[in-house]
Amino acid sequence: MAPALDITRTSNNEPVIRRLWWSERGKWRDHLLRLAPGDRRDRFSGLVSDAFIEQYCSAANPFSVILYGAFVDGELRAVGELVMLDRESPRRAELAFSVEEGWQNRGLGTELFRRLVIYARNRTVSRVYLISEPGNGRMQHIARNFGMVLGAEDGELTGRLELLAPSYFTVVEQLLEEGMAWFRSAPAVTGH
């Protein structure tokens, strides 16, 4: 008899943080639709409708939008987005983050920020930007912890971070983290 698949192996509420496949874009959309109104405002720097989120996700370019997600018990609860702004040197990118209510203040935004910065460095991005609502204290705290320079511009808070070139260590770190995340989220094969 063939072994049974045990898909409950990671049900200890410990998040699995990994890059999302483009085929998982629906999970990203569903996550954004679950955001509370204030969290939507923080993510998009203004109030947006369900229709806007549907359009935003369906129009995203898979060649310029990189998504990392935090999965808890198999459900996507937080997303970090890296949008490539340039294809030529110097390369720039914009960062955006969203964490669902009930999963905030657990370090998910910080970890997503760190992973996206490593990913950007490994793709020779020289500068990343962030746009935030002035009242989004959590995002400002995370940005400052990473050394991002913050300033006010047109009623929004903007951030800028200069990145170092990739190193052997950043490449290995990304490979190991992504490999471990896929290993942890794979169904276990058990004999019954």
Image (cartoon, rainbow, N blue to C red):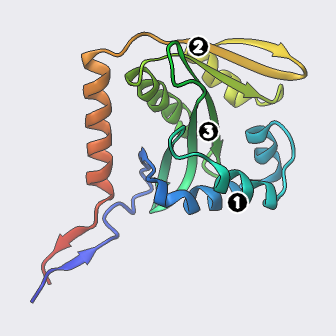
Image quarter (top left, top right, bottom left or bottom right) of the N terminus: bottom left
Viewer-nearest of labels 2 and 3? 2
Task: Classify residue 88 as left or right of residue 12.
Answer: right
Identify the disc placed on residue 105: 3
Residue at the spot 32% in from the left edge and 41% down from the top edge: 178
Q: Secondary structure at mark 1?
A: helix
User: Tag 3 or tag 2, which sits nearer the N-term?
Assistant: 3
Viewer-proximal residue, 84 or 183?
Answer: 84
Residue under pointer 2? 161
- Residue 118's spot in the image, x, y percent? 42, 25
Identify the disc placed on residue 34: 1
- Residue 154's spot in the image, x, y percent? 90, 19
Viewer-nearest of labels 1 and 2? 2
Distance, label 3 to label 1, CA atoms, is: 17 Å
Residue at the spot 44% in from the left edge and 31% down from the top edge: 115
In this orientation, does residue 82 appear?
yes
Distance, label 1 to label 2, CA atoms, is: 30 Å
Q: Amino acid at mark 3?
A: Asn
Identify the disc placed on residue 128: none
Q: In the rendered structure, are the residues bearing label 3 and label 1 in contact, judged by CB atoms less than 8 Å apart?
A: no
Crowd class of label 1 (few under 14; some 14 to 19; many from 20; radius 10 Å): some
